Amino acid sequence: MLTGMITSAVSKYLPGPGSYITRQDIRFLRPVYHYETLEFLLEVTGVDEEGHCVTLAVTATRGTETVLDGTLSVCPPHALPRFDGRVLENF
């Protein structure tokens, strides 16, 4: 369940829609139960422009207690090529 929350945050917000996780190393430090409130912190720790990859550190806390930490390698979406009016000539 916690991994799903992290995956959802990566694909929706950081780096953004279309991103996908290529590697993850997550440590579950304490048990988490239903209906508990957690706070997730995702921090960009590295950017490899040549390899088109971003490294993120992830931490989940319950109050002041850390329950999860890890690192992720994420590929953000590639920029879409620009197009001009010629693309629409067949309409």
Image (cartoon, rainbow, N blue to C red):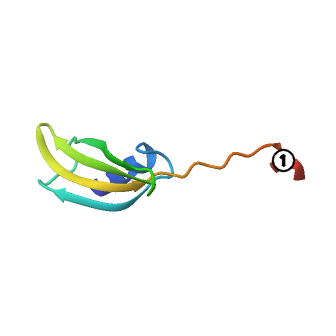
**Which of these two is toward me, 32 or 45?**
45
The x and y percentages for residue 11 are 44, 50
Residue 28: give x, y in percent of width and height: 17, 57
User: Is 20 drawn above or below residue 85 in the view shown?
Assistant: below
* Image quadrant in which you'd find residue 82: top right
9 sits left or right of 68 in the view: right
Q: Image point 88% across, 49% down: which residue?
A: 89
Q: Position of residue 59 (x, y in %)?
A: 22, 46
* Callout 1 amino acid: Arg
Q: Can residue 22 be seen at all in this image of the molecule?
A: yes
User: Residue at coordinates 26% horizontally, 54% vertically from top-left?
Assistant: 71
* Image location of residue 80, percent across then percent down: 62, 49
What SS does tag 1 mark? helix
Answer left or right for 12 relative to 24.
right
Position of 50 with respect to 84 (left or right) is left
Q: Which residue is mark 1?
A: 86
Query: Which residue extends farthest front?
Result: 50
Q: Residues within 10 Å of mark 1 (few under 14, many from 20)?
A: few
Q: How many marks?
A: 1
Taking 59 as reference, is 22 above or below it?
A: below
